[in-house]
Every structure is written in structure tokens, then in C-alpha cells.
Image (cartoon, rainbow, N blue to C red):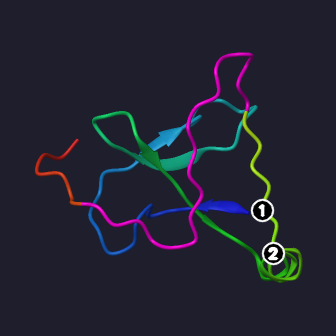
Amino acid sequence: MIPVSPVIPGTDLPETVYAKDQPEYSPLPVYRFDDGTVVSRWRCSFWERVRILWSGDVWLWQKTFNRPLQPVVIEASRPTFEQPSESR
């Protein structure tokens, strides 16, 4: 899977890119809410879709660096939220 931008199609949300200048990581385009919530969008390749259809499994790896685990949500449907009134 690769990160896809724009984060939420059809909206004009300002994008933040995590790890933009960190060559050891892949850049991750996200939308960051004022409360710290971050949304990223991922697109599966054809064969990844077949594999998920066949197995029903999606694996999530998180680097915690031995810190407490952050809450995570993985969804297959497009998130809905109100667009902020201020631009970042």
C-alpha cells in the first residue's frame, strides 16, 4: 500500500507531510486536525486487494519507540467531518 494524496478527495484541506525530510522514512501526506487527530489515505494495489479479499486481513505496524501506544482507527469507508473554517 502506498499513501495517496489528496488526503480526502473532493475537499480543499491543507495537507501536512510527515517525514518529508527524513530519508529513512517514506513521506506521508496527512490532514492534521487542531485536536491532534491525523487522517491519511492509502490505496491498495490490485494484488493487495485480491489478498485482502481472500484472507480478510490487513496488518498495521506501529513504531512506538517504547512509548505508550496511540489510539488508531482503520476504516474502509471515506471519513466524514466538517471542514474547518480557518485554513492552516
- Which residue is identified by label 1? 58
Q: Which residues are magenta?
A: 63-81
Residue 9 vertical placement versus 19 (above, below): below
Decide whether residue 68 is among the magenta residues: yes
Residue 82 vertical placement versus 46 (above, below): above
- Relative to the observer, which residue lies in front, 13 or 82? 82
Image disc number at residue 52: 2
Q: Secondary structure at mark 1?
A: loop
Q: Is residue 36 left or right of residue 54?
A: left
Decide whether residue 13 is among the magenta residues: no
Residue 43 vertical placement versus 41 (above, below): below
Image disc number at residue 10: none
Q: Is residue 9 left or right of residue 77?
A: left
- Relative to the observer, which residue lies in front, 23 or 57? 57
Q: Residue at x 78, y 83 (%)?
A: 46
Q: Quadrant of the N terminus?
A: bottom right
Q: Amino acid at mark 1?
A: Val
Q: Position of residue 2 (x, y in %)?
A: 69, 61
Answer whether labels 2 and 1 touch (C-beta < 8 Å): yes
Q: CA distance from mark 2 to mark 1?
A: 7 Å
Q: Secondary structure at mark 2?
A: helix
Q: Main secondary structure of the magenta part?
A: loop
Q: Earlier in the sequence, mark 2 or mark 1?
A: 2
Q: Position of residue 75 (x, y in %)?
A: 56, 64
Q: Position of residue 56 (x, y in %)?
A: 81, 73
Q: Residue at x 49, y 62 (%)?
A: 5
